[in-house]
Amino acid sequence: MNVENTKAQMRKGILELCILSILDKNEAYPSDILVGLKDSKLIVVEGTLYPLLTRLKNAGLLTYRWEESTSGPPRKYYQITGIGKTFLKELQLSWQDLSKAVEKISKK
């Protein structure tokens, strides 16, 4: 087995939680989301982020607004919705439970 594949799958599994957590603090442009993830050592490429943002938007967890840019085309800023906040709280509780279980199992 390749440990890098397993690590990548683990990161993908928590990406929604991380993106919603970033947007729960402030609305953000996708490149700002990527920086927030990178600062936390979660390296994500645009090709992964944009489909995920679209999926979260289509599920009603995110919305966006357009803002004119002085240096190019308009920018799309994403915000978490009320439904998204509720979903995020559920994910956070699930993460806490899962994290505690893994910690308990992996302690010697």
Image (spheres, rainbow, N blue to C red):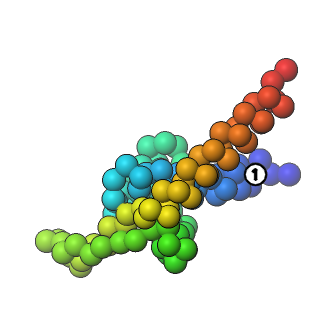
The residue lying at 73 percent from left, 42 percent from top is 98
Q: Residue furthest left?
A: 70
The residue lying at 49 percent from left, 62 percent from top is 84
Q: Quadrant of the C terminus?
A: top right
The residue lying at 44 percent from left, 62 percent from top is 82
Camera-side residue: 85 or 35? 85
Does residue 66 appear anywhere in the picture? Answer: yes
Q: Is residue 69 left or right of residue 27?
A: left
Tag 1's secondary structure?
Answer: helix
**Residue 12 image offset from top left, x and y in percent:** 64, 57
Total labels: the figure holds 1
Q: Is residue 94 left or right of residue 50?
A: right
Tell me which amino acid carries mark 1. Thr
Q: Quadrant of residue 23?
A: bottom left
Q: Quadrant of residue 30?
A: bottom left
**Residue 79 image offset from top left, x and y in percent:** 37, 63
**Residue 101 image offset from top left, x and y in percent:** 78, 36
**Whether residue 36 is situated above or below residue 87 in the rendered picture:** above
Instruction: Return the residue at label 1.
Output: 6
Q: Residue furthest top?
A: 108
The residue lying at 48 percent from left, 56 percent from top is 85
**Residue 77 image offset from top left, x and y in percent:** 32, 67
